[in-house]
Image (cartoon, rainbow, N blue to C red):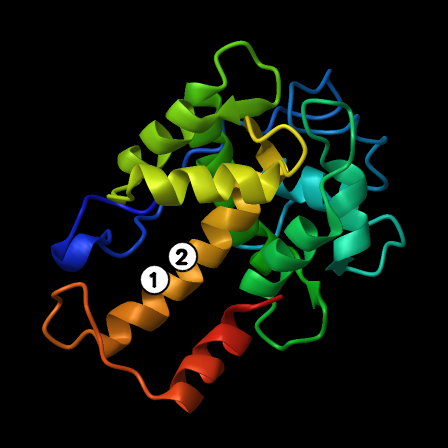
Amino acid sequence: MFGNPGAGGYPTQPQADTGTSSFPALPTEQPFGYAQVPQVYGATANPPPGISPQVQQWFQAVDKDHSGKINWQELQSALVNGQGQNFSETACKLMIGMFDRDKSGTIDITEFAQLYIYINQWLSVFKNYDRDQSGHIEEAELAQAFQQMGFRFTPQFIRFLIVKSDPKTHIRMSVDQFIVFCVQIQRFTEAFRSRDINQQGAITIQFEDFLNVALSCSV
């Protein structure tokens, strides 16, 4: 999802992945990670240029009000974690926000196609370590997942992420929480890299610039 490790302790730019294996064809039974998708309404014979029929089907199924746009609530209703619960509001807002180019709070089918690829990338990494398909990964698996993505985080930071995502038992992280951290870490990584002129993994930052980065990268 993020590419190979680069200088300064963070990975190189994300690499595009055209695979879509995590999204099954409709309207068959859905695997872990997706809610049962409703019957697709009036699918057109030919999708827009550059959009696969499978992406078009998913978009039309999730677009419940047939507006041609998807908001976070519609996305939330289509995604479930390993406990049968819908993805969190935070996760869905973050995912919509990543591809909402006009800041309308919604995404069109072209933007959804990009989100579709990213969700597959996130789930591919997560599923590699959620070997029992429980919908959770634990501390050691989380460390391995971030290492696969090219990050070199300390055990203390990995522990911090687990505790933050699971304040009661401090042992596990769900798939939607994993996606939230991936999005946030990616945003902060890009902001940090742009200020790390020598690519050394260290910067000096003014207080207002720090606040600008923090507020820009938040939900």
Give yes or no for contact between labels 2 and 1 (Cβ–Cβ under 8 Å).
Answer: yes
Residue in the image at 48% along x and 45% along y:
118
| Mark 2 residue type | Gln
Q: Which mark is residue 186?
A: 2
Residue in the image at 50% along x and 19% along y: 130
Q: Residue at x 15, y 59 (%)?
A: 8
Q: Is residue 216 above or below residue 115?
A: below
Where is the C terminus found, in terms of image quarters?
bottom right
Q: Secondary structure at mark 2?
A: helix
Q: Nearer the viewer, residue 76 or 107?
A: 76
Residue 162 place in picture, x, y as percent: 51, 37
Which residue lies under the disc numbered 1? 189
SS class of the residue under badge 1? helix
The answer to which image quadrant residue 174 occupies is top right
Give the number of callouts.
Answer: 2
157 or 213, nearer to the observer: 157
